[in-house]
Every structure is written in structure tokens, then in C-alpha cells.
Amino acid sequence: MEKGQLIHLIHQYMDNSISDDNLVLLKNALEQKADEDLLWLWDILMESSAATKGHAPDSDHLFQRIMLDGRLQPNFSKDTKKIKTTKRLVTLVAAACILVFLKFAIDFINGPDPIEAGLSTKSAIGTITPGGNKARIVLADGTQLDLETVKIDTVIQLEGYAVHKTADGSITYTVTDEHSLNGDMYNTIITPKGGAYNLTLSDGTKIAMNASSTLRYPIRFQEDARAVELKGEAYFDVSKQYRDGNRIPFIVETDQQTLEVLGTAFNVNSYGRMIQTTLVEGSVRISFDNGQSHVLKPNQQAVYTRKSKRTAINTVDPFYVLAWKNGSFAFEDASIEEVMESVGRWYDVDVAFKGDLKDKRFSGTISRFENIQKLLQTVELTGSVKFEIKGRRILVME
């Protein structure tokens, strides 16, 4: 389970809004974590409590409360020794949360006193909530499958293949009868604004889809090539496949870029005026409709500008590129437009700008599951911009 989804489930548990299915997901995820995984536990506690509620969590009891929750008949061990050990670790981590969160606040804000800043965030609606696991699949015959309505650990048997919604809420494909499938049978997964989803294709390739994205893929790949079509943003962890000793290429096509995977892990962002391809490990070859071609090395990013048809190759820190996949917004000297485009997609809101904001830039990290008003107030504390919320529209002003 991705860290961001786990944070979201902890939020739901703490405000007593978690469903039975999600409680099973949360318990299973916690059961699989090792006691010594302090870094993971520290992140969860800081982002699920200290950063959102403004005080240290009730760390002594949170883990035990979840694991021993009596609403369901648990399908896991209730080993008392393990709970005691984890409880001690939670206590140690909670102490670090306060110090680290204060350091984050000082580094990120670095601006005037909140009272002097004169926050102007106003809301005319009840709640704007962060995004979550939302997507639909368009099957080969045109039938649409809403993944939110499918219960976890459900197998949908279709002609020649099966779609399984696993215990962690993701989707996996399995070919059950190759003879009933042909190369032109495709499925399409669509994430809306405020949605994201993970899936595993029939060849074992794992994909994380960001909000407002579409991926078209064959149910069964051809023997000599594997190709998918992407609009929006996705992270790929490509499974290596060989035929007669030769690697079968994996190809990702956008409207103006073709990417051939020579390695494994990379991120493609094709939302707006540019196509950004960032390599995490391995190697990829990218080519564009202007005839240019480049081979990327790890930590390199190719930025293709659609209008000018120019390409720049930069060395980047993948942390900022992959933050969305790990449950955070993370920016390094980003424009206010870039920041608010990401916020708008994830919270499913419209964003408008008033005044000259071209020189407003931001650096910082915050959870994608933060309350929208707290997120905007954090940005306001820099003293550079102000926000006003009207319905599902956010106005950005000087």
C-alpha cells in the first residue's frame, strides 16, 4: 500500500469515518510493517496527526486501538509482545514528530507572523476534501467499471482474462485464456480530478496513475513489443520480459512523445505545455515528433516544450517528481501556477489568478491529504499570495 493511501486511512480511522473494507485494509497494512521500520512510522504519524491537527498524536494507543478494533473479526495475529514493542517505537517516534514538524514549519513558512499576515482564506462550502482511490475502467466492449464500487479482494472474470481488486485496493490483470484474446483488445483506466489509482498489467508492469489521467493498454501484449498510451501523469515500474534471449521493449506513447523503456522505473508528466520525463533507474530512449531523440540516465529529466518543440535535459532530484506518488506535494522553486495546478487536480477545484503573480515561487513539502484550508493557509504564511474560496473555485491574489 502506498504511504499516501495509508495516511488517508489513518485519517479516516481517527475521525471515525472509516468503512469496514478500509478498516480491513488498514489493519492488514499495519500488520505487514516491521517494528523496526521507524522511518515509515515517523512519516505516518507526522503527516497524519502532527501536521494536520497541530499537536502530537496519542501515539501510545493509536496502533493498539486500530489493531484491536472490535468492529470486525480480525484475520491477523494479535501478538501482545508485538503490540508492546510497536507501542514503544510509536512513543519514541512521536517525540521526534514535534521537533521535526516545528523545523518544517520554520523552513517552509519563513515569513511574517500569522496575525500580521492577515489570512484571507474564506470558504463558502462545507468541505473540499483531498483526492483518493478513484478510477473507472472502460472494458474492451465499452462497458465501464467504477472501481470505487468494487469491493476489495474481488475477482471479475471476463472473457479470456480476469481483473482482481486486491486487498490493498489496487487492480491486477491476469490472462486466463490467451486463445480468446487478440492483440487489439484494449482496456482504458481513467482517473478523474481528485482521483489516483495503482494497477498491475498482465505482463507484471506496475503503474501508479495520478489525477486527471488516462492510460490505454492491451489486455494481452504482443510477443515482440509492449505499448501503452498515456495522457496525464503516471509512474511506471516496468517488468522485464524476454523472447529468444532479447528483451521485449515497453513503449509509452503520448501525443508528441514516444518513450522506449530500456530499464525499469520512470515518471511521465504530460499535463500541460510541456512533457516531462524523469528517469529513476535504468535507462529510457525518448523521441519526439520533431525528430529529436535522447537516452536518459538515472536522475535526468527531459522537458519537451510543445509550442517551440525544443527539448532540455536536466539533472533533478526525483524526490520532488515522485512526491505525488508517495502522498505529498513537494516543490522546489516552483511557480504559483505550477503549485495550484497540482492542488486543483487533486482537490477537484477550479483555480483562477488575479494580478501579476509570475514572480511568486515556492519551495516546501506538505501532505496531499491535508485539509484544503490548512494547506492554503500554510502557503499564505509566506506573505506572497492570498486565497479566497468560493464554492469549488479558488482565487489566487497578491
Image (tube, rainbow, N blue to C red):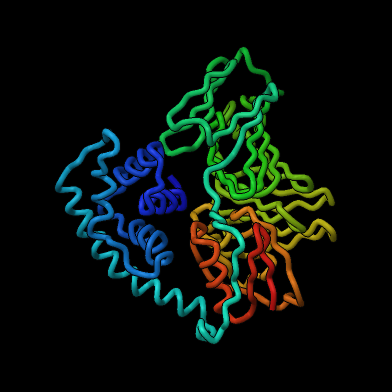
Judge whether 159 appears above or below 199 on screen.
above
Camera-nearest residue between 37 and 129: 129
Judge whether 148 appears above or below 223 on screen.
below
Residue 148 shows up from this direction: yes
Q: Left or right: 321 with respect to 25?
A: right
Residue 283 shows up from this direction: no
Relative image position of residue 130 (x, y in whole percent) = 54, 54
Q: Left or right: 166 with respect to 80?
A: right
Relative image position of residue 128 (x, y in whole percent) = 57, 56
Camera-nearest residue between 134 and 219: 134
* Residue at image location 63% in from the left, 71% down from the top: 387
Camera-nearest residue between 33 and 226: 33
Q: Quadrant of the N terminus?
A: top left
Quarter where residue 72 is shown: top left
Quarter where residue 75 is shown: top left
Relative image position of residue 382 (x, y in whole percent) = 57, 79
* Residue at image location 62% in from the left, 55% down from the top: 278
Find the residue positioned furthest to the left: 81
* Residue at image location 51% in from the left, 82% down from the top: 114
Q: Quadrant of the C terminus?
A: bottom right
How many marks on residues? Answer: 0
Quarter where residue 309 is shown: bottom right
Judge whether 159 appears above or below 62 on screen.
above
